[in-house]
Image (spheres, coloured by chain):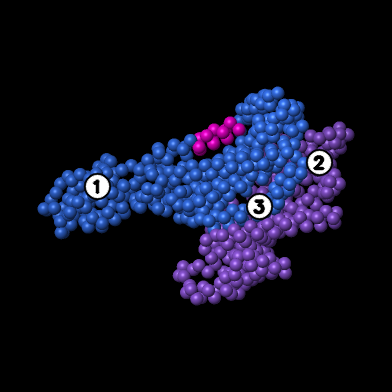
Amino acid sequence: MIRFILRRLAQAVPTLLAVVTVSFFLMRLAPGGPFDLERPLAPAAMENLRRVYGLDRPLIVQFGSYLAALAHGDLGPSFSFRDMSVLDLIARGLPVSATLGALALVLSAILGIGLGTVAALRRGGAVDRLLGLGAALSLSLPSFVVAPLLQIAFGLSLRWLPVSGWDGGAPSHLVLPVVTLALPQVGALARLTRASLAEVLRTQPVQTMRSLGLPPSRITRHALRGALLPVAAYLGPLAAALLTGSVVVETIFGLPGIGRYFVEGALNRDYTLVMGTVLLVAGLVIALNLAADLACAWLDPRLRVAA
Amino acid sequence: MSARLPLVGRGRRTFHRLARERVAIVCLAVLALIALTCLFGPGLTGHEPERTYPDLRRLPAGIAAQPDADHLRPALERLAFRMRVRLDDVSREGDALRLTLGSDSGIDRRSLVYLPRSDLFGEPRVVADAESGKRLVVSVPVRHLRFPLGTDVHGRDLLTRCLVAGRISLLIGLTATLVALLIGVGYGASAGFLGGGVDAAMMRLVDVLYALPFVFFVILLLVFFRASLVLMLVAIGAVEWLDMARIVRAQTLSLRERDFVRAARALGLGAPRIIRRHIVPNTLGPVAVAATLLVPRVILLESFLSFLGLGVQEPQTSWGVLIAEGARAIESAPHMLAAPAAFLIATLVALNLLGDALADALDPRAE
């Protein structure tokens, strides 16, 4: 087990290196720089700024020094947020994104797996069809349509919840963004659970349990354990996507999360901030995929041998 | 030896099963309707997508002919100001208005050209001229403009804009899916057929690519290199081929041990030919399902990028662009969000349900 985890972590290093390299050179190839303002700076000032941030050195030297700093866990200073390092910004944004993402993940997992199980148990019936339609609808409702509608309905008309803002993570500020984030995932998870559970319910062991007269609730519990395998595999990348913040939801609800720092960083050519956020997301994707694989191995002993 | 025969049989059975599903038929009909209206509709609405009617901004959806009484009076007053005349009297005569204009310094008849130029009126006809040109009675026909879905903040017809936007959204959905399809099928079939070390190396690359935060890369590309339609197509296609490659590879692995593939190999056919003629046609079932479900994802991704202002740029427009405009004007003109959102959601729901139905119809175990 330990060896499996270590091997996976070792495999992550080249992937992360690829992420760093691609995003570094992609940004430097792009036209524009971090100090291009509406009114151009005096050449001497520009010269000084570039020297302070080390942008006057050859590209390959800059890349080398970035990697060297990275090896010490230093993501460098932010170019657009003065006096802030990228680590400071991540320390500020990550709790926001992670809180939202974790809540949305729990909400969508409970609802999605629950509804998917109901649909699979009543396969072909009216409930199943209704849930199928609901799942397709939830997958097709873009968050940038749902979010303004929720804001209008619960924020402006009913005045139950604040329209936007973070306010230190007050619960009332979390409701609308979490619902917006979770909604499409409920549909996706319900679909996945239904398909997988329906498959398992057709297999020999389940038929045998039925013929032995086991109560349906116990059969469902056994079947669900096997059926959750693809769901667990899907939850890994999903968790990474949710935890690192949905760019749109953070933009619409005015939340200071990672997704917004990333977009602002990209627009301002804040090289280090963009690299930092991309690297963080990539790292989380890898870590959570690994966690999902471990969960699969726990659910299905056969996978442990292969690993 | 023909590898196509089983496909034909399965294809026909799939089609019959699909035809029995009412949901699938309805979805196909909805999609065909949306595609056709987007293709031919903009020519039939009577408005150019870019044409602005400054006097008719933010009209709500409705079938009544415009300009209505509420908009007529303020529009006339603005015109009179521009023509430097007084609006002494307005009376309605059927489809025309009888205007009595007055001016102490005499009316320049050339200024009447402002009336037809405003888009709301036809050619004016002078009925009477009194007090040596200081009083003019003019009969001017009122035009009948129709805006079934209302107008936007610039007074452009929303229906026409939704349809024109639909062309772009659907075009991107289909072409980007095609790009993903070509890369994914080619890559997956090659990996699966060649097998061994080549397969392991190729799929290892796919695993690595899976771990990359791709949406972030697409955003980076679009921010740095000026968003353009072609760049977006390439970026989305390049992101979405991974699933397709995995599906095709899994199919190919089982196909390559089948007798007809062995026979082809025994006859000395080269790998490219076998892949093209025997492997790929037999993977089309699952690929069709994946592609049907990929189109709505791509359309959604495009709208998402356009919503952030990174996708389709003015003067071109897409549903995502229109939804972004609508979200900004949601308090004063909610129909501006509702109209493009309805088009987008109808398309996505139809595609998603169609993909499900197709998957069910292709499922060999379904009774």
Q: Are marks 1 and 2 in contact (CB under 8 Å)?
A: no
Q: In this picture, is A277 found above or below B198?
A: below
Instruction: Determine the residue positioned at 50% across, 76% down.
Output: A44
What shade has chain B been given?
A: blue
Residue where numbered disc 1 is placed: B91
**Amino acid at the residue labelled 3:** Ala
Q: In this picture, is B283 found above or below B225?
A: above
Instruction: Tell me if I can see residue B282 in this picture.
Output: no
The part of the chain drawn in magenta is: B24-35
Residue where numbered disc 3 is placed: A182
> Which one is in front, B264 or A6?
B264
Q: Judge from the rendering whether residue B215 lies leftward or rightward of residue B69; answer left or right.
A: right
Q: Farthest left residue?
A: B132
Q: Are marks 1 and 3 in contact (CB under 8 Å)?
A: no
On-image quarter of the N terminus of chain B: top right
Residue where numbered disc 2 is placed: A223
Asked if badges 2 and 3 are on one and the same chain, I answer yes
Instruction: Determine the residue positioned at 65% across, 39% down.
Output: B186
Mark 2 and mark 3 lie on one chain; the one further toward the N terminus is 3
Q: Position of residue A300 (x, y in %)?
A: 83, 45
Q: Which chain carries label 1?
A: B
Q: Where is residue A258 in the image (x, y as percent from the top left)?
A: 63, 62
Chain letter, colour purple: A
Q: Farthest front residue?
A: B268
> Which one is in front, B81 or A54?
A54
Instruction: Tell me if I can see residue B96 in this picture.
Output: yes
Quadrant of res A173: bottom right
Instruction: Determine the residue positioned at 58% across, 57% down.
Output: B220
Inter-mark Cα distance, 1 to 2: 78 Å
Assign a secondary structure to mark 3. Answer: helix
For residue A241: magenta? no
